[in-house]
Amino acid sequence: MKKKSNDATPQRPEGERTLDGPLVEMNLVTFINQIKEESTWMDSDRNSITIFKSDVMRIVLIGLHPHAELKPHKANGTISVQVLEGKITFATESQSTQIEKGQMIVLHQNITHSVKALTESFFLLTLVMKQ
């Protein structure tokens, strides 16, 4: 398996990190601190960073300020949402639940859902794409 890294961007000029490889190490505390230090976090209601990306799976760390909302949308694969800090409301058209630090949910593909932060929150979004 070939090791894959991201390219530096204007927002993350020193942001090169391994996105895929035989073993990818991720320090979530370091990533949360990085998100909090970036101008996007200070200038908007959210910020995120992709910490793993392969042909079949993506893991994104998302930070939301209180009351920030991810409007209704669908995912093209099964997702899990694991809250690392804070508390969010995760809603589908038929169900709504609050999840907080240490809790997670799983949702099958193509189900419309939204997310709203009740407090400053950080969560891992894992997307497993259908093959």
Image: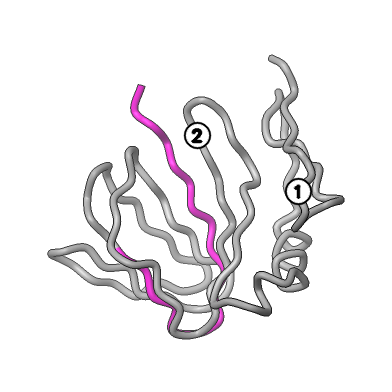
Q: Residue at x 13, y 64 (%)?
A: 94
Is residue 48 covered in magenta? Answer: no
Above or below, 26 against 129 in this view is below
The residue singled out by tag 2 in the image is 57
Report which quarter residue 117 is drawn in. Answer: bottom left
**Numbered disc in front, either 2 or 1:** 1
Position in image of residue 77 (x %, y %): 34, 38
SS at mark 1 in the image: loop
Task: Give the residues in magenta.
Answer: 114-131
Q: Residue furthest top?
A: 1
Neighbour tally class for label 1: few under 14, some 14-19, many 20 plus, Cα within 10 Å = few
Please state if 102 lies on the left or on the right of 109 as rendered: right
Q: Quadrant of the N terminus?
A: top right
Please state if 44 lies on the left or on the right of 93 as rendered: right
SS at mark 2 in the image: strand
The residue singled out by tag 1 in the image is 9
Report which quarter residue 95 is drawn in. Answer: bottom left
Is residue 116 covered in magenta? Answer: yes
Q: Residue furthest right?
A: 14
Report which quarter residue 21 is drawn in. Answer: top right
Q: Nearer the viewer, residue 41 or 108?
A: 41
Q: Amino acid at mark 2?
A: Met
Q: Mark 2 near mark 1, Cβ–Cβ under 8 Å? A: no
Disc number for residue 108:
none
Above or below, 119 against 64 in this view is below
Q: Amino acid at mark 1?
A: Thr
Please state if 72 lies on the left or on the right of 79 as rendered: left
Q: Residue at x 44, y 57 (%)?
A: 81
Above or below, 81 against 39 in this view is above
